[in-house]
Amino acid sequence: MAYRKSKRKQQNHLIGAMHAHIESMEDRVLLAGELGYLEALKDGVGGVDGVNFVTATDTSPDGKHVYSVGGVNNISSGNEDDNAIAVFSRDSTTGQLTYLQSLFDDDDTNNPGTADGLLSGRDVKVSPDGKHVYTAGNSDDAVGIFSRDASTGLLTYVSAVFDGIGTDGLNGATSIALSPDGTSLYVAGRDDDAVAVFSRNSTTGALTFVQSVFNNVGGVTGLDRILSVKVSPDGKHVYTAAGGNRNFTGSDAIGVFERNQSTGVLTFVDSYFEGDAQGEDTISGLDDLTDLVLSPDGSFLYAASHGYPQGSPDPWIAIFTRNDLTGELTWTSVANTFDLPASFPTYSDPDETSLVLSQDGAFMYATIGGQVVRMARDAGTGNLTYDSAFVGLDNLAHLYAGYDKISIDPSGRHLYVPDKATDSIIVLTTDLDFGDAPDPNYATLRANNGARHVAVGPILGASRDIDLDGQVSDDEDGNDDEDGLVNPTGDLNLVRGVAPSIDVQVSNTYGEDATLFGWIDYNGDGIFDNATEQASVVVANGTVDGVVTLEFPKVPADAVLGQTAARFRISTDYAFLQSPSPIGAASDGEVEDYTATIRSTGVLLFDPGTGRWRMGTSDGSSFLWTNGPKWNPTAGWTTFTGDYNGDGLTDGIGINNQNAVFFARNNGDGTMSTVSAGSFSSLEMFQHIMVGDFDGDGRDDLIVQQATNNTTPLPGSWFVKAWNGSAFTTSFFGRWEAADWVG
């Protein structure tokens, strides 16, 4: 914004530069806000493999690669999906993924590989140093170990550790956590109701079994059907989430363990159950507990329940403060699905909720069925406020199979969502494009609900320009590469009484029609008015580098002269299109801000000595003279000014000594051009040359009386030159005696 501004399986196959975009606009809904759909990569499309029944993703610490696991070994039906780990390179600018590699478990029926620890993959984690990748094989009861090439991101299978072979607690391995220093690895064994503890060799990636803690053993409680394990950011404590679902019972509790930072050994501290009393409060939000996450500063812990639909009696995300010395938790509040907007889709029994926080802690992302919800987080209170959502419909494919363990890139700009219902990884973006008009005169900053778009979908100009929050301007320096307006200098030089027509270059290949809106602040009050200062035009899907025209209302006669602001927004966002606004968020598109100048209607002068027309306009503080067309100064001109074509602008007209008539047209952009209006007979002489609206059409005309008798018309005949909407015509206008008239 310039404010002037059936697939064939192959083991370990490598395929590069392949993107598979699979979801149409009909298959997704973007609820207005700051979360946008970027792409989806589907198993078996464009060479992508290993993501059938994908359940978890993780992003490398350097942000260069994304890893996913999935699969299910359904013995009762004989059905088996990909039991594999897939590798993708990540574009650090756009967040888009390119498929690189997949490695399959040796027990995979369709495509047995040489790797292990991948059967029914339920979690994947990259080590903090980026050297290794670890997987939780739920049906393998194992952890898979892979070395990672830091440059290419490609993986090499190293080994796996299995339950019962010198280890314990890995039965039903479902969640992995590494300590911040990378020396310890913790695994939630769902079917063992246990946490398995390993030390990690940072050179080889090898894991050495250290300990297991089991539910109801040694005083430990709260681990029945454990689903998630996390390490605090300071490495002092380990937290667990255990809960039931529609088919199984569980503890519905959070477990707290003190961690020996040298050995990784865990000591049980306490557990917190749904319905426990804490002082005057009763803990809620842990019913059917599925996941938890800690804030980056370690001050808060968030625990997510099963994720029931809007309007259900059960809360959703419990919020606790954390004592960083003891690890103990204090329940403070709960965010529930009642807080979602009324338009939010619901499912009868959605899948487990997964949580992830941006690295700065500003936003929480949570899955609920086939939906990702974004919530703003108050760093002081820890409270969550609904912000926006992505909803994948897919013909209700997510009714019983929602999104699982999502991940976010280190910059916090892109989300990678495993969608087992469609065998896809969905990429969402939080990149925002802001306006850059002066704030607070015009709402630009996020703090003032300024205009902002998630940087996907339709664009203005040849390329997407992204201005950041706070990048405001107060002059015509152009903060970036604003290129939407075809002729900003001419089109934004506005004149009172004239309706601006502004050409805008646009592209829209996002799957459905977009609308382009424009606003110009005519009265200079710092508010873009929808009723009197707005124009709009539909931009059809499939438009590439097209030019559309915004037809604005006339600039009022009392418009404030001088510089003002113009804003242009394009989007397909349904909520935005229903209630278009110059402020607020849109889930796709772009916004650009420019400076416009409003001038008076202008004064025209003709210099007979030079034959030059000159135009003078005022912007309220100065008078600007502009040279217009030049006519032959020796032709004996008689000139007048007036509005001859009815556009509200002052033009010039003249007749020379050869009776030729020319029109000096005011183009409304500070320029003039010459248009021939034809001639009267060069054999006659004409007198009483006048201008006025002689035919009553609201446009000025030029009238002359014939004085001589060299051709058929008699002396005293009147002739009129008048504009017919596209050109000048000559017509007979009656006859008077050609003598003794004064006029």
Image (tube, rainbow, N blue to C red):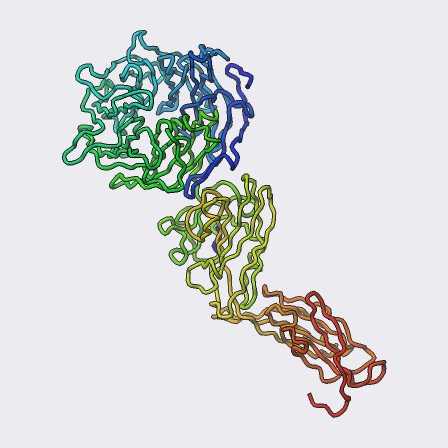
User: On the rendered structure, is 601 left or right of 693?
Assistant: left
Q: Is 731 above or below relative to 450?
A: below
- Is 472 rendered above or below residue 700? above
Give the percent coordinates (x, y) of residue 529. Answer: 45, 59
Report the side of 730 relative to 344 (left or right).
right
Q: Classify residue 271 as left or right of residue 457.
A: left
Q: Residue furthest bottom?
A: 740
Could you say which is closer to the camera, residue 45 or residue 260? 45
The C terminus lies in quadrant: bottom right
Observer-nearest of 37 and 459: 37
Q: Residue farthest to the top?
A: 165
Q: Is residue 411 visible?
A: no
Q: Position of residue 377 (x, y in %)?
A: 31, 40
Q: Position of residue 326 (x, y in %)?
A: 17, 28
Give the residue at the far left of this rendering.
279
| Residue 485 at x, y percent in the picture | 56, 53
Quarter where residue 312 is shown = top left
Q: Using the rendered image of the protein, determine whether residue 648 is visible from the camera's viewpoint.
A: yes
Vertical order, 226 against 20 (above or below): above
User: How many numbered marks appear?
Assistant: 0
Q: Residue at x 43, y 57 (%)?
A: 474
In this view, the residue in front, 49 or 669, is 49
Vertical placement of 109 versus 306: above or below? above
